[in-house]
Structure formats: C-alpha cells, structure tokens
Amino acid sequence: MKKELQLEFDYEDIKSFRIGSLMVLEPKKDAFNTLFNFDESFDIMDWMDLVKDDNSIKGILFISNEICFSDEAYVRYISSITDQHIDPQQPKFITKFVDGRKREIQINMLNNYIRKIIEFPKMVFMALTNCVVSPFLGVSLAADFRIANPNLVIHLNSKEYGLHPSGGVPFFLMRHIGLSKAQEILYSRRFIKSSEANELGIINYLTSENNFRKDALSFAIEIINSTNVEYFYYTKKLVNYKLLSEFNSYVDIESNMTLH
C-alpha cells in the first residue's frame, strides 16, 4: 500500500470510499497478504488514525468479499509459512513452521488490529460473507456491529490444524456468549451457520442473500445517522471501559505459549 495517506484511495488490493459520515474499507483480494504485511498493516492503522481525527466521520464499515477470510486464502497462507502442501479438504496437524517468527507476526498483527478497534473512538462495522476462518472471527467479534450475508459460515478451522484459535477467539466468545457455550463451541464444533450466529449474538444483523453489500451499507448508514458522533464516542468508551486491559492480560498468556 505505502502511498500518500488519504481518506479515499483505490489501490491494487484494497480501496476506501466515503458515503456521508461513513468510511468504507473494501478489499479486492483475500485479506491475508494485506493484513499480515507490516507495511500494509501499519498503513491501514495510520488510515484509521486519519479517520479518527476527522470530526465529520462517525464510523468505518469493513466489507469482506467471498475470498477475503476463506479457507482457501488461509490454506495458501499457512502453506507458505510451513512449506507444506495443505489440502483444506484433508487438513493435518501443523507441528512446525519454516520460520516461527512468521507465525508470531500473524498473531501479533491480529492482536494489534483488535487493540486498534477497541480503542477506536468511532463505530466499527464488519460485514461478512461466504466463509470466515478462526483467525478473523476474533477480529470481527472486536467490532461494534457484525453484519452477515445469510450464506456466511464460520469455520473454526484452528482445531483441524492443531493450532490454538488466534485472533482472540476464546476471549471474545466467552465475552459474547458466556463460558459454557464458548467451551462447547471451541471444543466440539467445526462450523457455525449465520442463523445460529445471529441467535447467539455473534452476528447482529443478517442482510438479504442477494443484496449483501447494499444492505450492509444501508444498515451502517442508518445506525450512524441516528445520532451524533459524541454519543458513539462516549457510549463506546463506557461499553469497553475494561476491555483493553482484559484483552492485554489475555495476550500475555497467549504470548507465553510454546506452540502458537
């Protein structure tokens, strides 16, 4: 990315545009190369700071695409850091990485995004479609609102590779649905469909299946147009008053684990 910082941009892998007081961030490809790349990630975080400092903007909507957080994208990434051919239809346990540092970078970048979302003083909406794998479920759970296409399937794929669910998944699941239900899902489930996720409160709003993008935009615009930016700022501050310190304590435990 590494271009001149501006609110609206259109790059090869991602674009941003404005609709009234809403900024929209939309990837054109899968999100792994962008979000796990130091330069690109810090560019996005700097962009969020630019949004934060503009008092005419009330929130950000991240709209995913069908490949953005998918199994196929995850497999390409995990294959690159294990130097193994991995078939998502026949997953196998990951026992080593070509460079353990790359796995640490993945975890750290996800945690950095989560911290950024928690601290961000404006609304953050995540719109999800098709498939979302474990590492990005946690990032979406850190957002203020989660919007989903009814075709969404959450794939808890970490278990299939013998890797702990990164992206703060255990932390946020317990916070959203309680300890007992989070344990049941983490230890015994592979998939969560959008309808169940909506009932659990993991997803806040389901779009129509054929108008996912339009409905997501309309919902986010309706929410942010309902009041002023100060309301969102102070309410989010109160809702999240303990969240960052609790998440940092969780990350401290995660960072001391031998196998990431």
Image (spheres, helix red, strand yellow):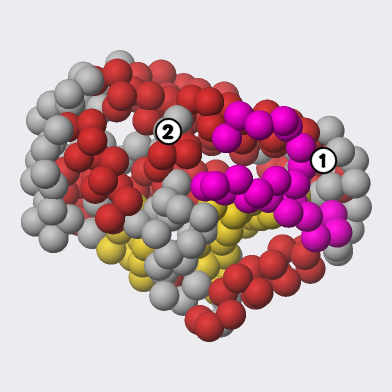
Q: Quadrant of residue 1?
A: top right
The crowding category of the residue bearing disc 2, from other C-alpha atoms within 10 Å (few below 14, some 14 to 19, many at least 20), is: many
**Magenta residues?**
1-23
* Left or right relative to 254: residue 1: right
Circle 1/circle 2 CB separation < 8 Å: no
Residue 14 spot, x, y in % from top left: 57, 48
Residue 166 spot, x, y in % from top left: 35, 37
State the residue in front, 246 or 87.
87
Q: Circle 2 sits on which residue?
A: 36
Residue at 81% x, 41% y: name it.
233
Residue 88 spot, x, y in % from top left: 17, 55
Q: Amino acid at mark 2?
A: Phe
Q: Earlier in the sequence, mark 1 or mark 2?
A: 2
State the residue in front, 107 or 227.
107
Q: Circle 1 sits on which residue?
A: 234
State the residue in front, 115 or 2.
2
* Left or right relative to 238: residue 68: left
Residue 2, magenta (yes or no): yes
Residue at 64% x, 68% y: name it.
216
Q: Give the vertical position of 258 relative to 174 (above or below).
A: above
Residue 62, magenta (yes or no): no
Q: Amino acid at mark 1?
A: Tyr
Helix, strand or loop for disc 1: helix
Q: Quadrant of residue 98?
A: top left
Q: Is residue 34 visible?
A: yes
Residue at 60% x, 45% y: name it.
11
Residue at 9% x, 56% y: name it.
90
Q: Is residue 177 visible?
A: no
